[in-house]
Amino acid sequence: GQQLNQSPQSMFIQEGEDVSMNCTSSSIFNTWLWYKQDPGEGPVLLIALYKAGELTSNGRLTAQFGITRKDSFLNISASIPSDVGIYFCAGPILNAGGTSYGKLTFGQGTILTVHP
Amino acid sequence: NAGVTQTPKFQVLKTGQSMTLQCAQDMNHNSMYWYRQDPGMGLRLIYYSASEGTTDKGEVPNGYNVSRLNKREFSLRLESAAPSQTSVYFCASSVQDAEPFNQPQHFGDGTRLSIL
């Protein structure tokens, strides 16, 4: 099946630093999603990307859809303590007919810790 | 507006016991999903329901059954719990049941299940 590999697996940074993480796949995706999971809660969508090369921002977060359609990147600028959590990339699981019905496959996550 | 509500939040079972995890959404979404989250493995799709009256297997369906009771409710059943099913279970819903994929999934806060 489709597999997404995220790196790094974990990050320990100081408040105010910038953060970069990425997600790669052996398969082509037509959509890339980035979710954040706060401790004890479900994932929440941060950014959705639908076109190769697309660069999209959401506040201090910026994500890019790789040109090859096999990778995506998430950057967080000027980190703050509330950025702590697990960041997941995700993409649609396609049926044989090329439809997903919203089904998603997730990367294993990047655990972010921010020290004040 | 509650969004996606999962019950119970925590549960401990003995091997061989059965249990049903409940999920309800109040957003009038067509599609609903069940995932499990294990350390270092991200979220994996167990079953999904593209629309009321339909269900289908995801990546890891073995040992589980589901019921789409109505448009609001989607339950997950473990008929004979095994220690390997110890996990955090998330229910999600989204507004669409067909392409193009452009609507986010909304997640509940999870059910933490331990099987001894």
Image (cartoon, grey):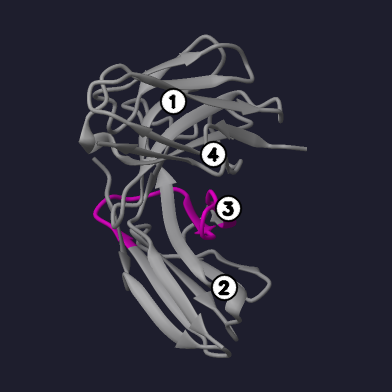
Q: Quadrant of the C terminus of chain B?
A: top left
Residue placed under numbered mark 2 in the picture: A83
Q: Depth check: B87 or A84 in front?
A: B87
In reply to whether residue A31 is colored magenta, the answer given is yes
Which numbered circle lies on residue B48?
1
Identified at 54% across, 60% down, the residue is A38
Asked whether B65 or A104 is in front, the reply is: B65
Whole-angstrom CA distance, mark 4 to mark 3, is 17 Å
Relative placement, left or right, of B92 versus A67 is: right
Q: Which residues are magenta?
A: A24-47
Of the two numbered discs 1 and 4 on the same chain, state the one appearing first in sequence.
1
Helix, strand, or loop for circle 4? Answer: loop
Residue closest to the eye, A24 or B62: B62
* Vertical side of B46 occupied by B101: above or below: below
The residue carrying mark 3 is: A44
**Secondary element at tag 2:** helix
Q: At which x and y percent is residue B11?
A: 42, 35
Q: Amino acid at mark 4?
A: Phe
Disc 1 from disc 4: Cα separation: 15 Å
Residue B5 location, x and y as percent? 62, 34
Of residues A80 and A55, the one drawn nearer to the viewer in this rendering = A80
